[in-house]
Amino acid sequence: MSKKSRPELENMKLEVAREFGINMNRGYNGDVPAKDNGRVGGQMVKKMIEDYQRQHSQAPMQ
């Protein structure tokens, strides 16, 4: 992972957590239950896959 993408992932994590009503902060979140961390991580992966599919379905065929 590039240093450039880390802040983007951190922002996505906080955005998804906020959508679920989970209180997360930048950096360490060891006080957040594993179930909530899993929900956030799973939703992040789902969004990344959807973005990838959307970008590649619109790309012109060569």
Image (cartoon, rainbow, N blue to C red):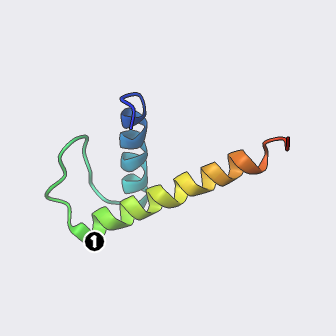
**Relative image position of residue 56 (x, y in whole percent):** 72, 47
Q: Nearer the viewer, residue 30 or 62?
A: 62
41 sits to left or right of 56? left
Residue occupying image coordinates x 36% and y 29%: 3
Residue occupying image coordinates x 57% and y 56%: 49
Amino acid carrying mark 1 in the image: Lys
Residue occupying image coordinates x 38% and y 38%: 1
Farthest residue to the top: give it.
4
**Relative image position of residue 25 (x, y in whole percent):** 24, 45
Query: Mark 1 sits on what residue?
Result: 35
Farthest residue to the front: give it.
62
Q: Is residue 28 above or below residue 30?
A: above
Farthest residue to the left: give it.
31
Q: Is residue 19 above or below residue 4?
A: below
CA neighbours of label 1 inside 10 A, class few (<14), some (14 to 19), many (20+): few
Q: Is residue 37 above or below residue 60?
A: below
Farthest residue to the bottom: give it.
35
The C terminus sits in image quarter: top right
Total of numbered circles in the picture? 1
Q: Nearer the viewer, residue 20 or 7?
A: 7
Report helix, strand or loop for mark 1: helix
**Relative image position of residue 2 (x, y in whole percent):** 39, 32
54 sits to left or right of 20? right
Residue occupying image coordinates x 67% and y 54%: 53
**Relative image position of residue 28 (x, y in whole percent):** 17, 46
